[in-house]
Each structure stands twice: as C-alpha cells, then as structure tokens.
Image (cartoon, helix red, strand yellow):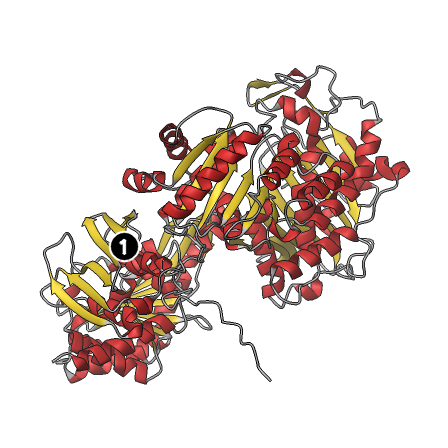
Amino acid sequence: MSSAVIFPAHPENILKGLGKLWTSLGQEEKQQGKPTVLRACAMTLIVATDEADSGFAASQTISELMHSHPARGIVLAVSPDAEKSLEARVLAQCWKPFGKAQQICCEQIEITARPQSWPNVGPTLVGLTVADLPVIFWCRHKGALRQAATKEEHAGLEAITSLATKIVVDTHDMPASEAVTLIERWQARERVVADLEWTRLTPWREPLAHLFDVCEYKLADFHSIDIEYTDERPTMAALYLAGWLSLYRPKVSFRRVGGYLPGVHRVTFHSDSKTIDFARTGPDSAVLHSASGRECTYNFGEPAVTALMTEELALMGVDPAFNAAFARVRELLLDTP
Amino acid sequence: MSVVVQPLPEVNPLQDPLRFSRRVPPCAIVIFGASGDLSKRKLLPSLYRLFYERRISPSFAVVGSSRTPMSDDEFRRRMVDSVSKFLEDAPFDKEIWDSFAQCLFYVPGDLTNPGSYDDLRNKLDGIEKSHQTAGNVLFYLSTQPSHYAEAILELGAHGLNRGNGWRRVIIEKPFGHDLLSARKLNDEIHKVFLESDVYRIDHYLGKETVQNILAFRFGNGIFEPLWNRRYVDNVQITAAESIGVEGRGGYYQEAGALRDMIQNHLSQVMATVAMEPPTIFDATNVRDERAKLLRAVRVVKPEDVPKHAVAGQYGPAKVGGEDLPGFRQEPSVDPQAQTDTYAAVTFFIDNWRWADVPFYIRTGKRLPKRVTDIAIQFKAPPLGLFTQETKGGLRAARPNLLVLRIQPEEGISLRFLSKSPGSGMRVRPVSMDFNYGSSFGERTPTAYETLLVDAMSGDPTLYTRQDMVEASWQIVQPILDVWTNTKFDFPNYAAGTWGPKASDEMLARQGHVWRIP
C-alpha cells in the first residue's frame, strides 16, 4: 500500500502521509474484527542512491532487511529525471511470517531529489528520523563518496552523516587510498563506520580464527602470509584480511590469480614447518587445509548484500576488530611503495 | 622472596566475539544410543547444523555407539538420511555433509558389556590424534534410563572419565522415577564424575523464549518492581499438547503427565519465572537462585493433595470429524490404566516475594491446541472507575495480564485497558504484543543446538543441577504417592477439551479461572 506523491516534501507532510497510511491499515483490522497488522520499528535506516546505482532495488532490499531489522526505511534517490526538485511518497512494507495470521508492517519513505536539491535533503531528514532509536545511514551515492565530489554533493553527504549513529559504506569498487581517506574522515568525527568489504570477510575470518583455538597453533609461528585475489588490484577486502592477520607483523604478500568470484581467493600461512591453506574451490565452497593435513569444506557462496547488511545492522556500537584491521591497513598502504 | 607467576591462559588474538559465534573447544562427542530416535531426530541434525554454521571447531568428532553392529561408513550412510529428513528450517548441503561425515565414527557395543568400553577407548585415542580433539570428550547418554548408572560406572571402571582433556556427561530425562531413585542415581554418578562435569538436560531450558524470560525480567527495570505478591494475583503456566501419546503409550503409561512434564520442564520454568535476580549472570549464581526457589515451594501434605492437584485422563471423542481414541484405547496401553494424561497443580512459594500467590501449572495431552505459555495475572486497581466492555466475571475485574508465550507464537503480550473511541468513558482491554519471530527474523537455534554448544563450552547455566532435580522431585513426590494409591474414575475429560472439571474447581476455590490460551 502506498500514498500519492507528497509535494512539497516537508517532514510534516510526510508524517501526515504516514499517519493516514496507518489509519487505513487500521480500518482493515476493524473490518476483520481482529488484529491483522503489527507495526514494527527498531531504527531509522536511510539509504541514499544516485544515478550510478540505478540498478539497485532499494525498496526490495529494505523489505528483505526488515525481517531481521524492522525499521522506518528512508530511500533517498537522486536522479536528474526527477519530476520535481524534491518529492516524497510513503508506503508500508508488510510481510506475513509463515503460518501466522498477523502481518508485520514497517513504514517506508521514498524521497526523490534532483541532483541540485541533494544538499537540501538534510533538513527534511532531520524531521523524519524516529525518536530515541538509532539512525543508520547506508551510503550508496557513489558521486558523493568520490574524492572528486562536487561541493553540493559533499554538503548533502555531510548533512546526512551528521544525523547518523552508524554509517555503512561499500568500498569494493573504490581505490584503496580513497576508501581509507573517506573512512578516516568519518572516524575522525567519532562516527561508527562499517565497510561491507570487511563484512564480506566474516566467512573467511571465522574458520581461520577457530584454527588458532587449538593450542598447537600460534599465530606468531607463522612468518609469512600469502593472499590471492581475483580483481585487478588488491581490493579493500584483501587489505583488511592482511591487516587483521598481520598482528604479529608477518610478511604479507599479495598475488593476483584467476578465480571463481571477485575478492579474496586464497590465504596461505607459512611457518618453518607448517602450512595452513584456505581457498575457494568453487563459487559456493571453500576448503581449509589445516597444518595437520586435515581438510574441511565450507559452504561459501558470495554473500548477498542483504546478508551483509543484516550482519551490520546487528552491530550498533564500535567494532574493535574492524578498527584494528583498518588502522593496520593504513600502515600497510604507507609501507607499500 | 620468590613469586610464582601463573601463566595466563592463551588468548586467541583472531577471535571476534562481536561477529563470530561463541567458540566451542575441540572435542569428541560420544553418543550412547546412537541408533535411537533422539539421535536421529535431534542430536545429529543439531550437530550438522552447528557444523554448517561453522559454530563448532574443525577439531571435532562424533562417536556413535549402540548395540546395532555397523561400520563407520554404514553409520554415516544411516545418519545422512536422518539429518536430511529432520533438519528444522535449514538447508541440507551435500558437500558440507561429506566434510561433516569425516568426523563421524561408530563403535558397536552393549552398555552392559565391559569389552565395548575398551573398543570405545581405543577409538577415542585414535580420534584424539587424527582429529586433534585435545582429549576432550563429552559423553551423551541417550539410552534407556535404566542403563544410566551402569554405563557411567563402566566409564569410570575403564578410565574413560579422565584423560588429556576434560570429560563431561550429558544425561537425558527422566532423571530418576521418584525422589529416592533420583538420589540413588546421583550417588552412582558422583562415584565417577564430579557434579561440575554432569549436565542433566532439560530441553525446555534451552528454548530461546525460556531464556528470554531472564532477559525480560532482569534486563529491564520496569517489570521487576511489579514482580511480587503486592501486584501479582496469580500465575498460570500451561503446557498443552493437542496430540495423544503417538505410539509412546508403553512409556507414557509408566510416566504420566506429572512426571513427564511438571517434575522437570514446568517446575524449571516456574523457577525461572519466580527466582530472585542472580548477583551476576553465571552458571553458579543462576542455578543457585533456581534451586533456592524450588526449595521454597511448599510441599503439599498428603491430606491436601486432592485440594491442590488434579489428575485427568482423556477419553474418546470426535474432533474435527475424526474419531480420536481415549488413552486406554491407544496401542500398548492397559485398558484399565490409571495414568494421568493431564495434571494440574497449585503451588505456593513460601518466600517474601511470593507468599500466598498461587502458581497454577497444568499440562495435558489431547487438549484443544498445542500451546505453552506463562500468564502473570496482575491485581485489579483499587477502585473500578470505568465500565468495561466485557462479558463480566472474574477475569474482567483484573485487566492487566502479561503473557510470556513459549510456543508456538513465541513472544510477549501485555493486556491493559484503553478508552474506546467516541464520547463517553468506556474502556476495553487491548493488547500490546512483542513477537519474537518478527522482531528477530533470523532463524533461532533449536534447544538442542543451544544445549550442545553450552555443554561443549563448559557452560551449565541451562542444565539442571543435583539439588534442583532433588528439589523438584521433593515437591511432586507427595502428589505422586497419593495418586499411586488412588483409584481414579478415568477417563474424566474428552479429547479436545481443556481438561477435567475438577481442574476448574481447583482454581474456583481460590476465586480464579483458567484463562484460555
């Protein structure tokens, strides 16, 4: 169920639209004589997209995310084709858990802005965040994230980040130095920052970490680590993995190889007498060869963006492991000629 | 003067507790009764699921043991069928299974044959080296309860209770069939294992929503001030099943509802609802408080049993166009059986918090629906200022009801009065709902997954301790004794109804009625 276009997109107009939406959902309940709708909200989730991201189905993604993290979703689409400078629409995203009679509904606000109006979205958003709950800003607006962003793009981005409890970004397609500068800038303002490139590493990191629960293995015994990747250059994922593993300052080397999927392909630890190897063996699997010669197969598909966001939305505070790895990535970049 | 500095335990610098599941140390799990139903339906599917989710260490092995002769490969083949069939809300992946299957082994043997334990020891020694299980072994007794003591004594006699790592034992319910047998079993177990290594499983405590009771009570500041005799009128705990004995007539005939549900699961749930806050959240403190609560439950005098407990047995009925048999018509059941398929008990907790507040517990088979919940009925406001749009009666007088739903729609509901729209000051009850499934959309682990991980990690918080088991037997024993010597006029409720009339009368004597869940 969705509303007509709301213009001008003042917060009070949009909130009035939401009020009407819930009233109409309540009418259905009245007709059926029993509760049919449960309103759920645990946060405000702002997703900003631009023209370069036009293939991304923001509404669909939010509706999938709300199964785990019900939220007031605000989709902010910047497009030169927008009919008006800034307009909005409200809708309810509902789903019915299997076998249950009641639908779970979350509200969603879609705001469309022309590029020149992008710096003005901040004041609209201020009035739309849900009181007393965290505000997550998932920035997919590639233009505003570029180092060469215009002054307007930069101002718009700053206005939204100032509202956010946590900022989520995906640096997969960014040059590493640019990604580091961006995250550093947000961290300097004491924002909690998450990078989906780091989140992609959880399936790699967890089995590797478990290996070192066995007392015979000590990370310090492994003097060198080889990381193979499939992209043109080491992406932030490869660098994060190196940063995370190089706690005892082993020699880290990177190598480009062919593989099944973009990103990290293999990680190998070398000590004087032992080798640990963890590599993708297909698009959906990876095999870990431990130093004792045993091998273990893992379910290892490319995580969908909803799975990555689900993991990130479960963590609202500071992520010490990410911060430590990120700090080490900066050093690795400085060390690299 | 010299100071001896104890080395600190090795900390794995790569662990990330924010994102990774709780670490489970390397270990081998020995399942006695590996060809039984519990293994096939619950244990192996749970272990596979934990493996699939990378929640158990790669240095891990399962050794199944039962009388059926078979090889490791045959055991693996049999288990693949069970796991793929009984996985709950989870996909089966052939490649992951192949990797998991490398960790499965089998030792044929009879629990009464000492030679079997030598075979088991040899197998475990080999696995310790090949799978780097660090000598840690968790024994799981999923056999006939009558074999528990013997199996444990044999483990001790063959030195399997000690080794290079830790040794623990999980014991399935029933833990004894009365107070005396439970004490005797405890004594036998303690000849071989320390109490800290004994994990008595009560799968109800592993349910997410039962654990959530602790989070709800002690993680929030607003409920606990109301959680006492000053504000609570009565508490009703219901565990209803719509099915009958489903082919377990032989077993159930000996057990009955009071033994099967109230002595263990529901008394533990009552303890969780009513216990005092622990000073810190750890196994010892949580279990101390549960045990203290159970010890505070008033033991009913034999002459008061008819006033405080009601036994029932379902008779035949037609439900939904289907003819349902009575209990006595079920296969393997004595046509004159005096078994209670329904039990309702009023407990009083003699402590400062709960004195004189009745805790009503009921459980039964062939009730109208499958539901387990806990209802906290709060007292009425001191003055009734408003007219309610209800049918009247006792329940209407006490509008505030907090319901903790354990299954099937896990969640919490709070009922309160609200003004009806329109002119005039008429009020009606409305409900504020928290739905566990919708607020946390991710798949919740099954009770067995939770409990297995806890036992492997050495966390007994959700397991029952010797004193808790004995205290819960203590409160049901007088009822069992009286019922054993009573000739009941069974059946006294029809399948598909909410139990015998006497159960309603038990509450009516206190001015209460059973709510309909």
Using the rendered image of the protein, determine whether residue A240 is visible from the camera's viewpoint.
yes
Is the residue A163 above or below the residue B385 in the image? below
Q: Is residue A68 left or right of residue B350?
A: left
Is the residue B8 above or below the residue B329 in the image? below
Task: Return the x and y of residue A288 as percentages of the image width and height.
Answer: 27, 52
Residue extending furthest right?
B303
Which is nearer the eye, B80 or A246? Answer: A246
Task: Return the x and y of residue B88 as percentages of the image width and height.
Answer: 43, 39
Q: Amino acid at mark 1?
A: Gln
Is the residue A237 above or below the residue B158 in the image? below
Image quarter for residue B371?
top right
Is the residue B439 above or below the residue A322 in the image? above
Specify the subunit that label 1 lies on: A
Residue denoted by label 1: A60
Task: Return the x and y of residue A308 as percentages of the image width and height.
Answer: 30, 59
Image quarter for residue B479?
top right
Using the rendered image of the protein, determine whether residue A3 is visible from the camera's viewpoint.
no
Task: Return the x and y of residue B13 as percentages of the image width and height.
Answer: 38, 69
Give me the residue at 26% from left, 83% from top.
A185
Which is nearer the eye, A159 or B101? Answer: B101
Give me the residue at 88% from left, 41% from top.
B301
| Quadrant including the N terminus of chain B | bottom right
